[in-house]
Amino acid sequence: MSTRLIAIIPAAPHALHPLLGKTPLSFAAEAAREAGAVRVLAVLNGRNAAERAALAEAARRLGLESVVPDKPQGTAAAAASARAGLAGEEASDPPILPAVFPLLRPETLVELRTFHRKRRAGLTLLSAVVPDPRGFARVVRGEDGALRIIPENGADGAVLSLAEIATAAGLVRAGLVFDALRSGRKSAAAAGRDWQEAAAILCRRGERVEAFITPRPEEIVPLAVPADAARIRAALRDRVNLRLAQEGVTIIDPATAWIDIGVRIGRGAAVAPFCVIEGATTIGARTRIGPFCHLRDASIGDDVAVSASTVIEGAVLEDRVSIGPFARLRPGTTLRAGSHVGNFVEMKKTDFGPGAKAGHLSYLGDSRVGADVNIGAGTITCNYDGVRKNSTVIEAGAFIGSGSELVAPVRIGRGAYVAAGSVIVSDVPDEALAIARGRQAVKEGWARNRRERNEREKNRAGK
Amino acid sequence: MSTRLIAIIPAAPHALHPLLGKTPLSFAAEAAREAGAVRVLAVLNGRNAAERAALAEAARRLGLESVVPDKPQGTAAAAASARAGLAGEEASDPPILPAVFPLLRPETLVELRTFHRKRRAGLTLLSAVVPDPRGFARVVRGEDGALRIIPENGADGAVLSLAEIATAAGLVRAGLVFDALRSGRKSAAAAGRDWQEAAAILCRRGERVEAFITPRPEEIVPLAVPADAARIRAALRDRVNLRLAQEGVTIIDPATAWIDIGVRIGRGAAVAPFCVIEGATTIGARTRIGPFCHLRDASIGDDVAVSASTVIEGAVLEDRVSIGPFARLRPGTTLRAGSHVGNFVEMKKTDFGPGAKAGHLSYLGDSRVGADVNIGAGTITCNYDGVRKNSTVIEAGAFIGSGSELVAPVRIGRGAYVAAGSVIVSDVPDEALAIARGRQAVKEGWARNRRERNEREKNRAGK
Amino acid sequence: MSTRLIAIIPAAPHALHPLLGKTPLSFAAEAAREAGAVRVLAVLNGRNAAERAALAEAARRLGLESVVPDKPQGTAAAAASARAGLAGEEASDPPILPAVFPLLRPETLVELRTFHRKRRAGLTLLSAVVPDPRGFARVVRGEDGALRIIPENGADGAVLSLAEIATAAGLVRAGLVFDALRSGRKSAAAAGRDWQEAAAILCRRGERVEAFITPRPEEIVPLAVPADAARIRAALRDRVNLRLAQEGVTIIDPATAWIDIGVRIGRGAAVAPFCVIEGATTIGARTRIGPFCHLRDASIGDDVAVSASTVIEGAVLEDRVSIGPFARLRPGTTLRAGSHVGNFVEMKKTDFGPGAKAGHLSYLGDSRVGADVNIGAGTITCNYDGVRKNSTVIEAGAFIGSGSELVAPVRIGRGAYVAAGSVIVSDVPDEALAIARGRQAVKEGWARNRRERNEREKNRAGK
């Protein structure tokens, strides 16, 4: 018989709502694994087929085994449901960790397990002494050492004054809870109450029921009411920002830097106040992120300068790029080393060459731009003709005069020059000048005449 | 004689400075009404005619009756000034609530009144026990039960150590304070001290003076110094965000979501960090507001996606619109269902049709845009000719090529196509193509020659 | 022999990293001077020539005298190094203030010095009783009054429980520490430990060693770990914002207003949440700064309205300007009184005349714009031709139609009118109309034919 550690994770649909980019299910699975679990069984408490499918897919991606009960279950019943999955491995009491404690650290699970073993308990709850126990079931310790869990709505004044709360996490001797529940009253399966029922049944049967008081009660913020989610997010944010600071990143204002857990930032980098950095973003060494930036799945190199109010999603910035303020990169864009993108510039699916510059008010889409190209202010690639998206190619060293439209598909040759204000509809050879604009005409005195006419009209209207 | 509850609200000019979109005068009036007052008398403490007029206008809009003393008055004198307005309704002791406690809840007024009646007091102050009583008058309770109010600057060490502070709010038996003040010393009317004077006079006359210690001292933050305004704003923000969370709105970071009290948000909506949402804004169910958004008097439907750094004022967004980042809507704009507005796009007084798209770098003003129109990048409605604003009409299904100027007044017909880079000065028929741009010319080798000439000149200059 | 007060400031490279725009070295120098020091000696603890040069340059700019030891030194050794600089002025015991306490106020130094003199001590440390002493050396006071400093890593449990921490700041009788160190063990020079060594040596020699417990322990946050820098920044931010509030500035959310110490703001001005205001920025009376603004070295007049998401660096805004949202001013730009700059507008090295307007999507660079000029949406000055930057001049009263490019160098005359969508390549006389765009052509039915063709192709492809 194996004694490998197996963990059971009851998970409801809100276990899939990410907090700083990581789902409560993922937090629970990671804590269980870091605490030594070699198998993790998720009990998928979906209320309908769609919810169950979403949970199953998430479990699969995390490499978890799944148990799907017929209807949502409380902790103990969920553990019972997981029994089939435990066949042949019952020697190891499985930790049961509902996916509602994103702040719980693996060491708490380890300590819980050590306590459970030392006490030779049949069931050990995770409990905590908290300043504000309202809303939680309480642990009542009898003089004979027997332990009861009283739900808050069934408690009297004396119990309500107790500060030791019972969580829905714990360990149970394999096999025990299943038998207990089978013999128990039907209501034992009622979600949120069955833990207490299981404890009561086991007590009556003479089993030892214990509660391990965590030394880190600040981890016990369950995802129950929305205000808790905000508290959990803030605590996770502080953990992320502290870790980054320890890794040599300057977070100017840790209270206003929202950086997802999966983000990686290099030594010597700095993040200004009021940034949201999400997903699988990586940021290189000594790179500086200005205020009001929103980055998602961005891959940013070393020594990059990102100015205020820049939005980047799914783009790559190589080393020494400078960008912003007010720049926006969409997926499929790569800014090559040393290139510059300025204000009010948008790029989409564009490979922007090393040393190239697009300083102002431009849109480049479905483009390939060579090295050291200069894109004038107000340049627009007309990549959509109403039917399909077409590509623009601008070869190295070309100069695109300001206010030009490049009607794709079109190629601007190496070193070519497009005169300001041109609408380019056909390819421009290497080294050539292309010009496509109206000729300037001047009508002397026209503006004065018009103004005088307007004033006469206004005077007449005023009479 | 009626026993209807009447409230008296002394109000100084700073009672008009809004906090999260609501003035202290409005807070006071609402608290009084919710506590049961059927008439509210505002005592308008303006220092000059302009201030008094502004206060009077604000009182009128809130449906309050106004009393205008000759010069600014303290609480008790203000109450005395209100006497004329109380004629015939003196059986109900009027609560007196200066418009400086935006955090005070109606239930506190109710409890104050209940206490006042039970004690059969002539005057009952609202008091509070606070951690930091500095700057406040203190309540001194004598052994004989007699109660004195000592202003801080007149207090000795023993009094200063007391933590029970006297507020300028309370209830007074109708008629009593007026007689007392009339018989009192002139200085009794000195603003900020007359409450104490009134209490002292009434005590000497054998009337019962009481203080009701509020069970919610956190409400007692008077608008006295600027740091208090900041504390009050933060407390109001937390109340708004807690209420929204309870209503099913996800506020990612309640500490950085500044949402006015009058804003309404639907279930399942989410607000990212760093947003300012003001005025009469309404936001529909499941709509998502990205970071760095500034919304004012916006009417936003269900399932709308508002991306980062979007500014909306006085505009309507129907269901399933997507907008931003870096979009800006000005008053008089409506985005019809399912339309899309992208980055660096501004709209003003524009009706933007269902399914229409304006993705990049455009300005639409004084326009009507039909269903499923595609507005290319860099499109500009030239709505101002230096004299008047003119309208642009773009009928359903039209396609406006990128970089076009539409010189208003102008109409683009149903299904018409405007070639990229065109300056459209006259109407385009339905289903037609309009093109208005220069023809492209190419000068081979021009760019190379120019570069070589420049280099020669540079070399010559370098010599 | 002079008795002028001299201060010694040991400074490591991180003394040059600014906090809210001010370096720790500058904080230390200012505190010493405000406490009465007439000479300040900086001991420059650079680890290499570059670091020493940077420190020396910073010291020079602050008007400090410099001492450069061969290698980085602890506090006491630094004091010894400063000895040469103290020649002839040894009567005044020099305060020693390492540049790691940006929060320390001058009055603390004054009180420290008064204490030191009264006690006739040889050496007086600055100590503090703090809630969390972990990481600090502790002050141990013996029954005989003798005082020891125990570094944390050398302390036992009883010492670790002490809450009085020893800082590296203090005063020492001139000459004493130098002699002590000279006679001390070599290890006395080990950075961070020599203060304790010096105290121990002086004790053994029968000198009086004291510790002054600061009454303001919140000032004792040394710049040691990154989390401390964040705490210090937050405390400095709160000080700045409190001072501004006291000066009559409305800071809507003091927790999210990052305003550098050197910024000056006039009475009646207001700053919205989420702003970063840096450097030598000045803001006039009654000016309003919207949310998400990033200002650096801006000079802004009275009654200016700065809307959301505006970025200004090194520019001047005269009175009654309105700007934003989404505007960006670069160095060398001046907006004259009453002018208006709208969304998605960038200016660089531009003098923008009184009453002039540039409302949308424009770039003005290297320009001079006269009074009451109207710049249409999408106007671009083509100031760069690939070789050099050229100037654009637009005289008073001119009207630039939307979507125009002005190819510099070029001059638009007084009152002249540029037709929308023009590319202006040569000067426009006063009062003239200039027009430079393609003539509009229309092809009836073209769009319908194209659509039908596309659909036929699509159907064929779909088969």
Image: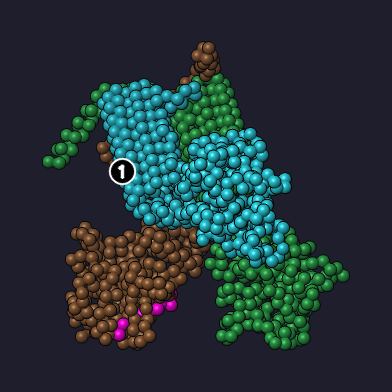
Chain colours: A cyan, B green, C brown
B3 with respect to A27 (left or right)? right
Q: Where is C377 relative to C259, above or below?
A: above
Residue at 20% in and 67% down: C68
Q: Nearer the viewer, residue B237 or A80?
A: A80
Give the labeled residue for mark 1. A320
Observer able to see residue A91: yes
Whole-percent x and y of residue A345? 41, 38
Judge whether residue B309 can be spotted in this image. Answer: no
Percent position (x, y) of residue A376? 35, 36
| Magenta highlight range | C208-216
Please state the horizontal and vertical placement of residue A221, each as a whole percent of the image: 56, 55
Residue at x-position 70% and y-position 60%: A155
Q: Residue A99's spot in the image, x, y percent?
A: 56, 47
Residue sitting at x 20%, y 85%: C1
Type of amino acid at the residue the image marks with label 1: Arg
Describe residue B216's horizontal placement relative to residue A423 as left or right. Answer: right
